[in-house]
Amino acid sequence: MPATYDTLLRRLQAGFDRLSPGADPVLRPSDRTDYQANGVMGLAKTIGRPPREVAEELLGQLDLADLAEVEIAGPGFLNITLTPAFLARQLNDLVADARLGIAAAEAPRTVLIDYSAPNVAKEMHVGHLRSTVIGDALARTNRFLGNRVIARNHVGDWGTPFGMLIEHLIDLGEDAAVQTLSMGDLDTFYRAARTKFDADEHFKERSRARVVLLQGGDDETRRLWRLLVSQSIAYFQEVYEKLDVLLTPEDVVGESFYNPMLDDVVTDLAAAGILEESDGAQVVFLPGFSNRDGEPLPLIVQKSDEGFGYAATDLAAVRDRVSVLGAHEILYVVGAPQAQHFDMVWAAARAAGWLPDSVRIEHVAFGNVLGPDRKMFKTRSGTTVKLVGLIDEATERALAQLNARESDMSDEERQRLALDLARAALKYADLSTERQKDYVFDIDRMIAFEGDTGPYLAYAHARIRSIFRRLGETYVAHEVNWSLGDSAARQLALGLLAFPEALEVMTKTLQPHRLCTYLFDLAQRFTSFYEACPVLSAEGDLRDERLALCDLSARTLSLGLSLLGINAPERM
Ligand code: ARG
C-alpha cells in the first residue's frame, strides 16, 4: 500500500512542479492540522512572486480533493486535513497489511554494515556496546526493508601486540590461558602481558621475535594465534547472545583477513601515482588533510619496517567490499574519534579508483558513554566495565521491580521477562539518544517502567495485548467503518499511518533515535486515546474501530521495537 505521506507528497509535487520543476513542497506532519506543506515560501522566492499569490494559484491547481482539504495559513503555509474517506481507506489498508505500510524494496541494495569490532584478547568496552547495538538496529531495519545486509565484524586480530600475547600464553600454559580467556577475563590477560612487556627486557625480546614468526607464517605460532582468536570470538559470541544481537561467528572478518590483499593495495596505489615515500614509510598525502601545525598529514600504508597497520587493512577492506562484495552502501558504526581515519581512507580509495561515487559510504559515528561523574564510563578501579556485568545488573533490577508487583507469573516467566526488559533498557537508552552525543549511563533511569525508556514501551505494548486477553475471543483484524469522531482516536490513527516515514527517516539519516522518538510518541498517543475512549464497553462500529486502533498500535510497537532489536513481550 502507498504510504499516506508519499501519496500526499506525490500529488503536491505535481502542483509544485508545474510552477517550478523540482520545487520541494516541504511536507511535514503538523500538530495544528494533519500535515503542513511549507514549501510555498521557497517556491515564491524562486519564481519571484508573492507567496500568498503563489499559494492561491497552487490551491486552484492541486488535485487533492479526494485526499484532503487544503487551506492557506499565515504567509503561505498549506494546512492539510485528510478527508474521512481517505483516512478510512488508508487505515483499512493498514489493518490488512502485515508490513504495516512499509513496502519492501523493489530494487534491493547490498548494504554492508561494519559494526561491533572488538579486539582479540581485550575486553569489549561500552564503545563496542554502542557500535553493536546501533549496528544491529541498522541491520535489522535494512533486512526488513528487503535489502541484502552483509554484516562485517572487523575484529582487531592482528598487529604487534600479538607477539607479547602469544608469549604470555606460552608462559601461562595453554590450558590456564584458555581458562582465563573463556571466562571472558580478557583484561587480566592483556594487562599481565603488557606489564611483563614493559618491565622485562627478555620478555620484550621474545615478543618481538614472536611477531616475526607470526608474520612469517610459522605453524606453531599461527596455531597459538588462532587459539587466542578463537577463544576471544567464542567469548564475544556469548556477549552477543546475551544481548540478543544477530551477529554470528561467520560475520567475523577480522583485520587479518585482509593480509593477503595488502601487497595489491600497495601496487594499486603506486600505479595510481599517489604512493610516496616519507621517512622510509609508504604513505599517501591527500589534499585537505593536515596536522595541528598545518603540515600535510600522511596516511601511512606501510611502515618503514614494512609492517602494515590499521589504515592499510581498511583500504583493502573498502576495495574488497566494493569490487568483490558489490556493496551499494557501506556503513561504519565506529566511535566519533575515528572520523579523520575514515575520511582519509575513503579519499585514498577514491583516488585509487576503488570507490565510485555511486557507493554510499558513511561513518555512523557515535559519542561516548559517560559515568555518573560525566567522565568516561569506567569501574571504580578505572578498568573497563564488562558488558555482561551490565546486562546482569539490569536483569536483577528488572526482576526486583517485577517481584515487587502482584502477578501470577511463574519464576521462570519472570526471569525471562526480566532479561527481555534488561535488553530493552540498555538498547533503548543507547538508541534513543542522538548518536553523535555522549550519554550518561544511568541504570536506574534506563530500567524504569515510566518515562522514555525501553521497559516503558514494552509495557505499553503488553498493556494493549492485555485488552485482547480480556476480550475473551480470538481477535481477527478486519475492515472497519471508521468515524474517528474523538480527536484522540484521530491523532492515534494519524500516528499509526506515519510509521513508514519514521523508518525512512531513520535509514536516511542513520539515526535510530528517530524511530525511538516515533515509538514513544505513538505510545503517548495511545495513552491519550485509551484514557478518552473506552474500548471493551463500546459497541458496534465504535468498538470495532477502537479494537482496530488497539491492534494496530500493538503491532506497530512490536514491529518498531523489533527493528531496534527489542523484543516486546506479550504480557508483563
Ligand atoms: N577494532 C576497532 C576498535 O576497537 C574498530 C574497528 C572498526 N572498523 C573498521 N573497519 N576500522 O576501535
Image (spheres, rainbow, N blue to C red):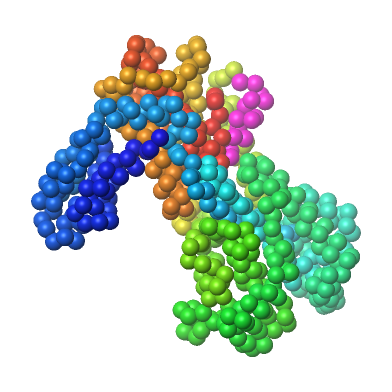
In the image, 134 versus 381, the foreground residue is 134
What residue is rendered at 52% in x and 48% in y? 108
Q: Quadrant of residue 168?
A: bottom right
In the image, 497 versus 460, the foreground residue is 497
Side (left or right) of 334 relative to 498: right
In the image, 109 versus 449, the foreground residue is 109
In the image, 3 versus 563, the foreground residue is 3
Range drawn in magenta: 409-429
Above/below status of 288 relative to 9: below
Residue 469 magenta: no
What residue is rendered at 56% in x and 53% in y? 110
Q: How many marks?
A: 0
Q: Quadrant of residue 382?
A: bottom right
Q: Position of residue 569 (x, y in %)?
A: 56, 29
Image quarter where the N terminus lies is top left
Q: Position of residue 13 (x, y in %)?
A: 27, 48
Q: Position of residue 395 (x, y in %)?
A: 62, 37
